[in-house]
Amino acid sequence: MECLDAALYKSPELNKTIKAKMADGFRDIVIHNSNSMHNMCVGLTGQGNITIEDSTGLYTASFLEGPRIVVEGNVGWYAGDDMMSGELIIKKNTGCNVGAYINGGAIVIYGSTGSRVGYGMKGGTIIVCGNAGRWAAQMSMGGNLIILGDLGRQAGESMYKGAVFTRDTDAINKIGGNVYLDEITPEERIMLTELFDRYEISADPSEFKVIRPATSGRHNYVLFKPVLIPEAAKKLALRGESHE
Amino acid sequence: MSDETKLKEPTDSTKGLWHKDTLAEIDYKASAGKHRIRGCATPRKMPNFDDLMILPGQLTRMTIDTYREDCETRTVLGKRFATKPLVIETPVMIGGMSYGALSKEAKIALAKATSIVGTVISNGEGGILPEELENSYRQSIQVLPSRMGFTKRNLEVADMLEFVCGIGAKPGLSGHLMGSKISAEVAEMRQLPIGIDLHSHPRSGDFFGADDMVIKMEQMRELTNWEVPIFVKLAAGRVREDIKIAVKLGVDGIILDGCQGGTGAAPVMAADHLGIPTMPALVQAVRTLEEMGVKDEVSLIVSGGIRDGADLAKALAIGADAVAIGTAALIAMGCRVCMRCHTGNCSFGIGTQNSEQRKNLDIDEAAERVANYIQAMTAEAVLLAKAAGKSKLKNMEREDLRALTLEIAAMTGIPLVGSDLVIGEGFGFTANNKI
């Protein structure tokens, strides 16, 4: 095992040092004093286990391809963006937009996450053990997002492809436009069971439902347009509430 | 009064504001209850490079022989921080037009044209066709808010990167690709359902403002080992403020897309009423870069309605380092600007995914025509530059320009033709006649 003190580096030098250590054959690297540094472990490739003992800033493990990164603390926005493969394991909570555009690999958040987790995701798996903010998997194009806690509003808004698994009993009132709530298939139940076993998550797959895109064919897709309700305006005017 | 002598009422056939296009617009909305989508660019008349004239060299400057002497056109872009700036043979690049908006054949033809003349092509939204990459001389890769078809592999093949914040034809909006063009092949590349009307992602999901983008830029530099020039593409709007932010992000260059730019599909409202025209936007961008003292560091590419060598020469004179063409290249291939690209019904095989119509485009012939056009356009610009006494195209300068009208003089700060009157905000001119 190799230990690195992040306080001695700026992120590009730190990442370069990690790459050099991995090239030298070190499979287990521990990083101290990350102090919420941005861009940690960006673009790492190959095989290895990197443990960050503290919290990290923005863009942690972006464009990751291969290694397993474990962050013991909290993680900032945009972690794992454009990830290709490998694992990003986050022991605590994250900011928003984690897993934006991921193509593959797995992100596991043992705490809660902010808005837009899995924004535009195209593949891979994201598991959120806590709650997720608004617009989870917004406009996703593939992959699986699994949320064990409460869903934020407009979950799955305008998904093109992919699936959002939820056991939020109020999910039907929280889903966004152009998606619907469905029962999970036996294959999906097996997938969830395997994932929960692998990441030691205590959850019963049978409790889950799935949000799926409504885009099975052309024009089954509703876009915003102003809602004009004359009766509502009349009521406000009568009550003298013409101003917002 | 007999019938023969009865006076006829005038028809007032022009009907003022209520001409036939306005009536057709209203009829459409009355019937469909939604706004109209249109292909190509705005048909509105706006200020453009024709409003400027180039001053020829006479006694103050010696002209260069048009037909016998050299004039360099080679152009280097993105040398601010990138260790491998882009070197192209002509300051004319092919702007981002997606596979999806265009047929595969059209994309391959454009790529082949770049190899004939030695320039760069931008892939546009929705990933890059292997055939485009294989045939292009230099490849610019767009990093768009949708990231459709984009992976880390794209970074590895890029000769230039463009972070797209907006496009001139529909600034503030995003890619529109109507269902008739989302064929099985296009859908697979973009990971979309076949036949869906695509209204793409409007904002990037991995930066929400300038502060984030500074960190994002560091990330991209690290991923590209500081080798690949990174540009940001901006639709022309609040040019001064946007340029200042872009410079502070640490980009190598800026692509500024004016509102005369074309597109495969855009709401008519957006194309006609959002953004500002290319020429005055360019002036504002150059002014801003000069105020910041980075004009020589930051490359500036301008696009939106560029048609010929005069536009090119004048853009360079104002301060651009290169131009990007789109619609003009499609016209060179055979497009007749029917403005119905959004329907996917293009008998020229350019803006379609219909397998029968695609057969109508001969790739090699189209590539040759686009290459000829770029060659001729470059030659036209060289002709003007030499007449102005320049042995390098990039030596065109704003002092070589005069404005044809008071409005253009006020808009650009370039002296009025004939009087040398300078109006309004300066542009480096010290004229005797200043208002």
Image (spheres, coloured by chain):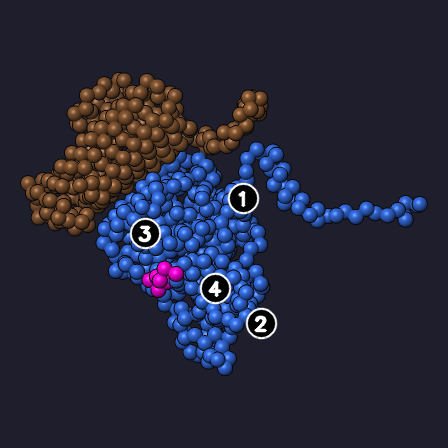
* Residue A104 picture location, percent across and down: 25, 37
* Residue A191 picture location, percent across and down: 24, 25
Residues indicated by labels 1 and 4 sit on the same polypeptide chain: yes
- Rendered position, B351 above or below B50: above
**Residue depth check, mark 3 versus mark 4: number of the one nearer the observer:** 4
Q: Chain of mark 2?
A: B
Badge 4 amino acid: Gly
Q: Categorize mark 4 by other alpha carbons within 10 Å: few (<14), some (14-19), many (20+).
A: some
Q: What SS does tag 3 mark?
A: helix
**Residue depth check, mark 1 versus mark 2: number of the one nearer the observer:** 2
Q: Categorize mark 2 by other alpha carbons within 10 Å: few (<14), some (14-19), many (20+).
A: few
**Mark 4 vs 2, N-terminal side:** 2
Q: What SS does tag 2 mark?
A: loop
- Give the CA distance from mark 1 to mark 4: 35 Å
In the image, the chain rendered in blue is B
Q: Is residue B293 magenta?
A: yes
Instruction: Tell me the magenta residue range.
Output: B291-297
Which residue is tagged 3?
Answer: B249
Q: Which mark is residue B418?
A: 2
In the image, the chain rendered in brown is A
Which residue is tagged 1?
Answer: B268
- Rendered position, B158 above or below A160: below
Q: What SS does tag 1 mark?
A: helix
Which residue is tagged 4?
Answer: B426
**Mark 1 vs 4, N-terminal side:** 1
Q: Categorize mark 1 by other alpha carbons within 10 Å: few (<14), some (14-19), many (20+).
A: many
Q: Residue at x 26, y 52 (%)?
A: B221
* Residue B334 picture location, percent across and down: 51, 55
Q: Is residue B168 left or right of residue A69?
A: right
